[in-house]
Image (spheres, grey):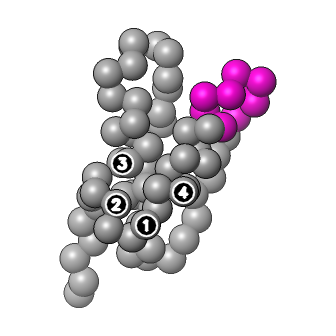
Amino acid sequence: MWNDNETNSDFIDYQHLVNAVTSIVNNVNLLPCSIGVFGDWGSGKSSLMRMVEETYLGYPVGQVHLV
């Protein structure tokens, strides 16, 4: 069985996806919104979400809600 460990490091060149997600979240004209992340097992979905989450660390509580 393969290990499936998410990471905060962008080993799979997902920065363009992180930028896409954060640009939607940061655009008040698009809120509220739901963003779906789909992909095969091991394709980097959890890593993408961890990189997005890391972008918002340090923001005031209540300003960004990641579920």
Residue wearing tag 3: 50
Residue 13's disc is: 1
User: Which tag is nearer the camera, tag 3 or tag 4?
Assistant: 4
**Of 3 and 9, the residue lying toward us:** 9
From the viewer's side, name the closer residue of 39 and 7.
7
The residue lying at 70 percent from left, 22 percent from top is 28
Compute the Cα span from label 3 to label 1.
14 Å
Amino acid type, callout 2: Asp
Marks 4 and 1, how far apart at CA = 8 Å
Kindly identify the amino acid type of the residue bearing the numbered disc 3: Arg
Q: Residues within 10 Å of mark 4 (few under 14, many from 20)?
A: few
Looking at the picture, how far across and down is residue 50, in whole percent? 36, 48
Using the image, tell me which numbered label, if any, was put on residue 44. Answer: none
- Looking at the image, residue 38 lies above or below residue 55: below
- Disc number placed over residue 10 in the picture, else none: 2
Residue at 22% across, 76% down: 3
> What is the distance, in whole Å, between disc 2 and disc 1 at their CAs?
6 Å
Query: Per the image, is 31 magenta?
Result: yes
The magenta span reads 24-33
Kindly state the secondary structure of the residue where label 1 is placed: loop
Q: How would you classify the magenta stretch by its main secondary structure?
A: helix
Contact (Cβ within 8 Å) of mark 2 with mark 1? yes
Q: Are marks 3 and 2 in contact (CB under 8 Å)?
A: no
Left or right: 43 as drawn, with respect to 20: left
The relative height of residue 59 versus residue 16 in the rendered view (above or below) is: above
* Sequence order check, earlier mark of 3 and 4: 4
User: In this rendering, does residue 32 appear at all?
Assistant: no
| Helix, strand or loop at mark 4 | helix
- Name the front one of labels 3 and 2: 2
Q: Is residue 9 left or right of residue 26?
A: left
Q: Does the segment drawn in magenta span residue 25?
A: yes
Residue 21, by quadrant, is top right
